[in-house]
Amino acid sequence: MEQILIVEDDNIDRKLLETYVNGMGYEVVSTHNGREAWELLNINGNTPQIAIIDWLMPEMDGITLCHKIREKAHSNYIY
């Protein structure tokens, strides 16, 4: 099953996205901020195909997370 990463600090928005994406048949992995997502990407062996990332978040914002993802060599490209 294809995996989608959701990175959203707002609980309501995150739950709505999880429900919507899960209903489309995707496996959903979600985190509360960019730092948690970055740790997940470095630990988890399954790289998601798509990441839905909030722009403004505490600890690490979305643009910083995107830059870090691009700097790291992943076996699969993350959109």
Image (cartoon, rainbow, N blue to C red):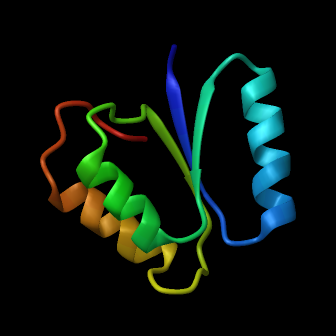
Q: Residue at x 81, y 23 (%)?
A: 23
Q: Quadrant of the C terminus?
A: top left
Residue 18 lies, in percent from the top left, at 74, 41
Q: Residue at x 63, y 22 (%)?
A: 26
In front of the other: 43 or 70: 43
Q: Outermost residue toward the front?
A: 43
In front of the other: 79 or 72: 72
Left or right: 37, with 39 as reference point? right
Residue 51 lies, in percent from the top left, at 50, 46
The answer to which image quadrant residue 47 occupies is top left
Residue 61 lies, in percent from the top left, at 49, 79
Q: How many marks?
A: 0
Q: Residue at x 82, y 37 (%)?
A: 19
Left or right: 39, with 48 as reference point? left
Q: Outermost residue toward the left?
A: 73
Left or right: 31, with 74 as reference point? right
The answer to which image quadrant residue 22 occupies is top right
The answer to which image quadrant residue 37 occupies is bottom left
| 46 lies above or below 74 | above
Q: Residue at x 33, y 31 (%)?
A: 46
Residue 40 lies, in percent from the top left, at 37, 53
| 1 lies above or below 60 | above
